[in-house]
Every structure is written in structure tokens, then in C-alpha cells.
Image (cartoon, helix red, strand yellow):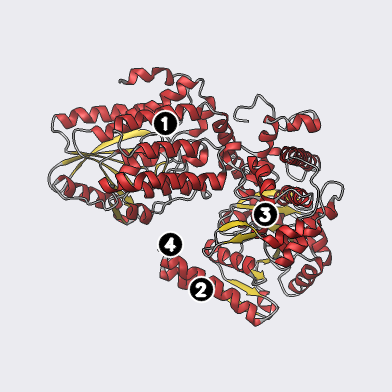
Amino acid sequence: MKLDHFSELWSNTDEVITHSYVQDVKLPSGKVLALITLDNHKDHTRPSTLGPLTLKEFAETLEVQEQRAKKGEIHGLAVTGKPYFLAAGADLSKVGSIPSTRAGRLVVELGHFALGKLGNFPVPTFVFINGLALGGGLEIALNANYRTVNSAAPAIALPEVFLGLLPGWGGAYLLPNLIGIRNALKVVIENPLKQNRMLSPKDALKLGIADVMFDPQRFIEDSVVWADKVLGGKKVSRPNKPGLFERLVIWGPAVSIARKMVKQNIGSVPLAPYAALDLLGEARFSSKEKGFKREDEELEKLIASDQFRASIYAFNLVQKHAKNPQGAPDPKLAIKVQKVGVVGAGLMASQFALLFLRRLQVPVVITDVSQERVDKGLAYCRAELDKLVEKGRLSVDDRNRYSANLSGTLDMNDFADCDWVIEAVFEELKVKHDVFTRVEAVVRPDAILATNTSSLSVDEIGKVLKHPERLVGFHFFNPVAVMPLLEVVKAAKSNDVSVATAMRVANDLKKTAVITSDSTGFVVNRLLGYLLGEAMKAVDEGIPFEEVADAIAPLGLPMNPFDLLELVGLQVGAHVLDSMYGFAPERFYKTDSLHQLAKLGRIRTKDSKGNKTGYDPEAIKIVSGRTRTRSKDQVFDDLIVGLTTEIKLMLDEKVVSSAEDIDLCMIMGAGWPFHLGGITPYLDRIGASKKVFGATFHNPMIKGV
């Protein structure tokens, strides 16, 4: 195969090219290493990406160096990136404009053609993973013979399954044959499906993705010296490289178990995870040539699928729309937060305190109604810091610094010098009124106040304040450290300084913030509240828990409604549904049985290891005895109509600025699956929008929707 084979990809592209710059490095031994540096010359914050012209130039550069190697002019070849980045993978910004299935197949084949040269080179090849290495960026490294990694590299991953794709430039074949099938399943399947988790440099080293790790101060220099030793005969051991026993005994069952877990967690609708599992399974005995060809075939199918176009819509929301929040005031209005106060020391409040400590790196003081509760909150935070140290994710010095910045008090006067105070107390208006009355009495006039309410009106909460303009809603999702969304609620009296500060704090916390108006349930809880209410309505009608969960499963949410209720707490769930019913009794369902389930304390049964095994007999008794009136399909259809109605009303009421904001909230706050592309385009595709209001949320001509 030659580059001319891909010539139709070169025309009509405005790709930001990542160039391949070559320099010869004289090694201590006297040998010569050709060092290729990938650099898009855009700016230091824009990751290098791999589009067709980038891959063409990379392949051409390797062909020139190949001739030099054959002449004995170079003894090794290495690839690295500009500061902070190796490469962030394929240029997904152009994926929506791929003109045909054939062109998509050519892009995939071009990646194999270019990157694969590293594995078939006349002299040893190295990749110095100096920074971010995602998707195709990591696959550059996997195609080489040896890899070093910078201990300060921010993230290493194969996130393709999260995006509705699979690692198709060698990753699905090379990775399991490098680090073993169980480790490869974790990187390719498990991590992407768990909120797209990334690997740290230490993880990459431990797994065997990297052969050695060096500190950033002399990363390139140390990598070059190490490469010289390898060229001189140094042996590189890889303890996770699979042997015959793993291939014969472990490989097949590991893939089968992973397949069952995927089906249990996300159902059978998403295409990408199962295609990736097929390729990982086949990598056991197939040749590299066959493995690469199978990657081409599977990626061609995925790129042509509706799921992939939906995933790209979701990807663009997260990457672009989220970075330009609609309705945000001028960021320059934000005040600098140098001390944080947290009212409450329960689990949610303690999670806040821990997040503020680590991300804002400022003093945090917590309070509650008793010293016992305060001490419990402090102990939780310090125990979590200790766990991070044990896992190697936090240094002892940082743990000590964070711990020193954390304090507890029963005296509200200790909040006097806080710039930001947030409450996380019980969802009852009287309790929140009492909290903010006491807080406002001691804090500075310019301090910003925030409430983590999930269903109460921020304006109603602020009625007791002398200066309600400084109050904003700041709604986290549980678990706080993991869930990326923050709903910043701009109430009728919230001023721009307060909202701008909230948006800056959200950004510093590394959360995705969406500004909403002060409407009951805001976005996520309004829609999830409707869904949970409909689920309870169905079981109250006599439909079994299992059947209701199956009816809702096509939405692809990360857990069924009853598991979600147990996660948020049955008492909290009942309170939220009561609030939603009070907001719109004509549309939301009032469920007395959920209060009874809350008293029981459970819906599901669990085994000794905590795994859910079924539904509790006492819970079944609470909702039994009714005569069902709807089929499973009718439950789903009614739910879809209701969700469509609520979204249309939210847009009419200007709860958020656009349908894209609602999609972003559901993706980041409710785990709405990427392969469905956002809830509003999904409702358009299945005809619910037309059915409910005679139109669509999106122009059907918009690609990816």
C-alpha cells in the first residue's frame, strides 16, 4: 500500500496540521537517534490531533527516516510531542464532515498505514510519552517497540468506546498482547464506561504500557539516555505480557465475563463496547495484520452508524458547548475565593469540603449542630486523603497541607472571613432559612452565599436575607468527586457578581457548569423526578419492579430507577418527588408508597458482598395488590411523551438557554449515554417531539443530530 491510495483525503480540508519535525540526537554511545516532535504550532493549550494531512506527513517523515536507517545513518527513532501533549487522538472536529463510508474507511486505514510503520521499522523505535496521550495518541506509542512516560503527563487513555468507537489504529490488537487481556479490558472497556476514567503515568508504568518513567525536569534527556542503553543491549522486561497459559485458559473467560458485565450495566443497545470486545477476544491468536484489518472493518461499520453520529453530537457538546456556558456574566466580575465555609458535616457536605480543599487549595471550615457531627465530617475528609495517599494519587506533603487547611467549628463567627459559604443541610425551607440568617449575620457584605438545594426555590430560600442578590444555587450531583455537572442557579435576585463567582468556582473545581433559572428541580432533577415518579406510578399500578426497570432500559441510563432511588436515599427521593408534585400536580405523580419504602429502608436485596440480587419481599408487598392497566410498552411510551413535554416546557419557560444545555445536563449529570447523543435529538429521532408539539427540538439538517 502507498500514500497515493489515500489521495482523496487530502482535498477540501481545513485541518490544523500537526507537523512532524525531525532532529538528529547524538547519543552518549556515539549512535544517532532521529527524534520526531509532533507540534501543531497553534498554541500551547490546543492539543495536537491526528487528521488525514497530519498522518500523511507523519508517514512521509517515517519513510524518509526508514531510508536513512537502511543506510546506517540512524540507529534508532523516537517520537515525542510538544510541551504537555503527545497527541489527543484523531481529529474528531472533522468527523462530521466525512463525505462517505469509503472515506471513513480510508481514514482508518491511513492511521494503520502511518502508525504501523513504527512497528516495522529497520531500527528500534521509541515513543517518549511527554504529555497527554489519548486514543490515537496512545496508539502511536503502542505501535512502537519501546515507551517512556513523563511522571507529570496529565492523562493516558483509550477513550474510544466512550465515544461510540473502538481503538482502531492498533489499540484493540496491540494492547492485550502487551499487557494481558484483563488489563486491556480495564483500559479499553471498563475505564471508558466509568465516566471515561483516565490512567496516570504510574498506572501506565504498572500495567506495562510504559517501560520506564522519568520526572519532567529532564524527561527527554533521560529518555534519550535510556534509549541509548536499549540500543546497546539493555533488556526490557514486561511482566504483564501474556504467555501461553493466559491465552489458552484466561483470555476467553475474561472476555466473556466482561461481556456479561457490560450487558448488565448498559444493556445490549450500544454497538461500540461489543465490537471492541469481539476484537479483544480475537487478538488472542490472530496476527497483527489480521488484527489491524478487523479493526478497519469494525470501525467502518461504527463510523457509518447513527450511534456514532449521536456520539459526536454529545462529544461536541462536552468539548465545545460546555466551555462556552450560555448566559454567563463577564468572568472579570467574579471575586477571588480565598476561604470557604461549609454548613453541614454530613456525607454530601464532607464531599464538598474535600473537593474545595483539593481543587481550590484554600482553607475550608465546616460546621454543624454538634461537635460529634463536625468531628465525623473532619474524620471523613482526612480518611479520604489518607486513601489517596495509599493509592499513590496524593503525596504525603499535599495530604498534610490539605489537612492543615481543614478545620471544624461550632462558632459561626469563624465564617466571618469566608469569601464563599455553601450549605448542604436537610431539604427543608425552614432549616435553610435558619442557616442563612445565621450566616449572613457574621460574613462580610461581599461574601457569596450558595445553596446546594436540589428542589427548593433559591428565591424562597433567600427571602430571609438582607442581601438576597448574593445568593446562588450551586447544585452538585452525587458522588461529588465523580459527577462532572454543576447546575448554577441564577435566581431572580442573584446579581452578576454572584453568578460570575459561582462560574469561576465551578471552573476551578473542574466541573461543567450550566446556568439555569430558579425553576423547581432545575434541569436534571426535573427530568429524573418525572422519570422516577413514572416508575413508582407503574409499580403502584401492579407492574413488577423488574418489568418497570426493563421498560425504561432502552433509555440506556447507568442504573435503573429503583437503584437510583436507593443511591440518592429513599427519604431524599420521596422528598424530591413530593416537591415536584407540589410544583405541577397535573403532570407529576404523588407516591405514598415511596414514603413507606423509605421507612423500610430498601427496595433491593443484596448478597454478602453487597451485590444486588433482586427485590426485597417486603418492598414487593408495599406495592402489591393493584391491578395493572398498562403494558410494558405503554409505560415506555407514556414516559417518553412526559419527558418530551417537560423539556418543551423548560425551553418555553427559559429554564436554560437552549436544548443543548438540557442535553449537556443529562449527559454530565444523569449519565445519559453518549451513543444516544443527547436526550433532545433522541426524542426527535424516535418521533416523540413531532407527536407532542408538532415540531422538533433541532433542525433535522444539522449533522450529528
- Residue 261: x and y, percent? 50, 48
**Nearer the viewer's eye, disc 2 or disc 4?**
4
Residue underneath mark 1: 17
Q: CA distance from mark 2 to mark 1?
A: 46 Å
Residue type marked 2: Ser
Choose between 606 and 494: the one closer to the eye.
606
Q: CA distance from mark 2 to mark 4?
A: 16 Å
**Nearer the viewer's eye, disc 3 or disc 4?**
3
Q: Residue at x 61, y 50 (%)?
A: 559
Residue type marked 3: Phe
Identify the image quadrant of residue 644.
top right
Choose between 589 and 257: the one closer to the eye.
257
> Which mark is first along the chain, 2 or 3?
2
Q: CA distance from mark 3 to mark 2?
A: 37 Å
Residue underneath mark 3: 562
> Which mark is first along the chain, 4 or 3?
4
Point out the image quarter for the C terminus: top right
> Considering the numbered disc 2 on the image, is that residue within a helix, a strand or a loop?
helix
Mark 3 is surrounded, within 10 Å at the Cα level, by few (under 14), some (14 to 19) or many (20 or more) other residues, namely many
**Nearer the viewer's eye, disc 3 or disc 1?**
3
- Residue 338: x and y, percent? 59, 66
Q: Residue at x 14, y 42 (%)?
A: 31
Residue type marked 4: Arg
Q: Residue at x 30, y 48 (%)?
A: 246
Residue underneath mark 4: 393
